[in-house]
Image (tube, rainbow, N blue to C red):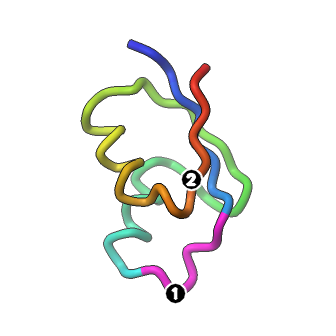
Amino acid sequence: MAKIKVTLVKSIIGSDKSQKRTVEALGIKKLNHSVEHEATPAIMGMVNKVKHLVKIEEI
């Protein structure tokens, strides 16, 4: 599996509750914080849900 790096680039203030929980479930704690994950279908679905808040890079 490929690895991806997910970085929060926009604030979650004003987002709905499910998007806030998705960002938390990805392990992102605050703005400009990055985490690395395997590019599994579940992770990619989570990233797709909050794609307007995060930046995705392949590693």
Q: Is residue 11 magenta?
A: yes
Residue in front for this viewpoint, 57 or 32: 57
Task: Please give left or right for residue 17 compared with residue 30 in the image.
Answer: left
Q: Is residue 49 above or below residue 57?
A: below
- Element type at marker 2? loop
Residue in front for this viewpoint, 56 or 35: 56
Quadrant where the C terminus sits is top right
- Element type at marker 1? loop
Report the amino acid beneath label 1: Gly
**Total residue callouts:** 2
Magenta-colored span: 10-15
**Residue at the (50%, 48%) spot, across then down:** 27
Task: Please give left or right for residue 5 compared with residue 20 in the image.
Answer: right
Q: Can you give x and y, in whole percent of width and height, for residue 47 in the image? A: 41, 48
Question: Neighbour class for label 2 at 10 Å: few (<14), some, many (≥20)?
Answer: some
Q: Can you give x and y, in whole percent of width and height, for residue 43 in the image? A: 34, 38
Q: Is residue 18 above or below residue 56?
A: below
**Residue at the (61%, 32%) spot, across then down:** 57
Q: Which mark is residue 14?
A: 1
Tell me the residue that label 2 is attached to: 28
Alpha carbon distance from label 1 to label 2:
17 Å
Question: Neighbour class for label 1 at 10 Å: few (<14), some, many (≥20)?
Answer: few
Find residue 10 and report its image quarter: bottom right
Q: Can you give x and y, in whole percent of width and height, for residue 49 in the image? A: 35, 58
Along the polypeptide, which appears first: circle 1 or circle 2?
1
